[in-house]
Image (cartoon, coloured by chain):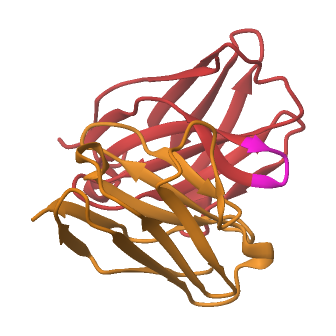
């Protein structure tokens, strides 16, 4: 059974960079069969896709976040990561990592439990 | 970007009743690549339906999806107490991947 677990600071200062890691167990980030995504949800609001990456290096981002987002993978630790720069209070949200069902099927059947990141001085 | 509009925003029903949730897209969803998720408070979303009408593994048959093009529906035939939650649609036919704003199904 694939499991994903987000980790990272729960508090980030405005203008700084938010950094989160997703550790995968029961599966491999090196698999070419899947894209790995980040999705966020502000408190009391809906879901917003941030972006995704494939072990091949292929990435896609939500347009309004594209210039602030960096996704990367560490195969040695079976992890993938999100960096979001120049954060503001609007970036305060629960951040989820998730695995797509399969290449070409861009929906998610495996999700992390989510981690709350608050942007505040 | 494909904008998904879900209605109603809140649905107040009693256990045993039928729930009908709508998801309308701003343009055609390619190959009916539409999914539905259920989210309970403090939990990650759970995949219910993909391909507009295919139930995900382990999802009870009281959940059904239908639709194509720009209009999609999630139906819960008889609400169980555990079905009261927020439901989101998501299109995956066109990047960027987008979600609807959600429908909350609450106990009347």
Position of residue A109 in the picture relative to residue B74 (left or right): right
Position of B18 relative to B78 (above/below): below
Q: Residue furthest left?
A: B108
Residue drawn 43% across the image and 49% down it: A40
Residue B51 in view in this figure: yes
Left or right of A79 in this view: A96? left
State left or right for residue A47 relative to residue B55.
Answer: left
Kindly identify the residue that appears in the image at 84 percent across and 54 percent down: A104
The answer to which of A101 and A43 lies nearer the viewer is A101
Q: Main secondary structure of the magenta part?
A: strand
The chain painted red is: A
In this rendered view, identify the residue nearer to me: B66 or B71.
Answer: B66
User: x%, y% of residue A42?
Assistant: 30, 54
Q: Which residues are magenta?
A: A101-105
Q: Quadrant of the N terminus of chain B?
A: bottom right
The residue lying toward the viewer, choosing from A29 and B22, is B22
């Amino acid at each position: 059974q694939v499991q994903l677990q987000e980790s990272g600071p729960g508090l980030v200062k405005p203008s700084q960079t938010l950094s989160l890691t997703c550790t995968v167990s029961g599966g491999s980030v090196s698999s070419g069969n899947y894209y790995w995504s980040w999705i966020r949800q502000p408190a009391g609001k809906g879901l917003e896709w941030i972006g995704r990456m494939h072990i091949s290096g292929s990435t896609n981002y939500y347009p309004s976040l594209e210039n602030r987002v960096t996704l990367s993978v560490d195969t040695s630790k079976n992890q993938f990561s999100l960096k979001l720069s120049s954060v503001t209070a609007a970036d305060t949200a629960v951040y989820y990592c998730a695995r797509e069902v399969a290449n070409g099927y861009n929906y998610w059947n495996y999700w992390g439990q989510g981690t709350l990141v608050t942007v505040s001085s | 970007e494909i904008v998904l509009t879900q209605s109603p925003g809140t649905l107040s029903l009693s256990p045993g009743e039928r729930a009908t949730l709508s998801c309308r897209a701003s343009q055609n969803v390619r190959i009916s690549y539409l999914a539905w998720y259920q989210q309970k408070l403090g939990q990650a979303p759970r995949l219910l339906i993909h391909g507009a009408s295919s139930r995900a593994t382990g999802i009870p048959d009281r959940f059904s999806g239908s639709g194509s093009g720009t209009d999609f529906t999630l139906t819960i035939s008889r609400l169980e107490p555990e079905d009261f939650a927020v439901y989101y649609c998501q299109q995956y036919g066109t990047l960027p991947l987008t979600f609807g704003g959600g429908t909350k199904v609450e106990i009347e």
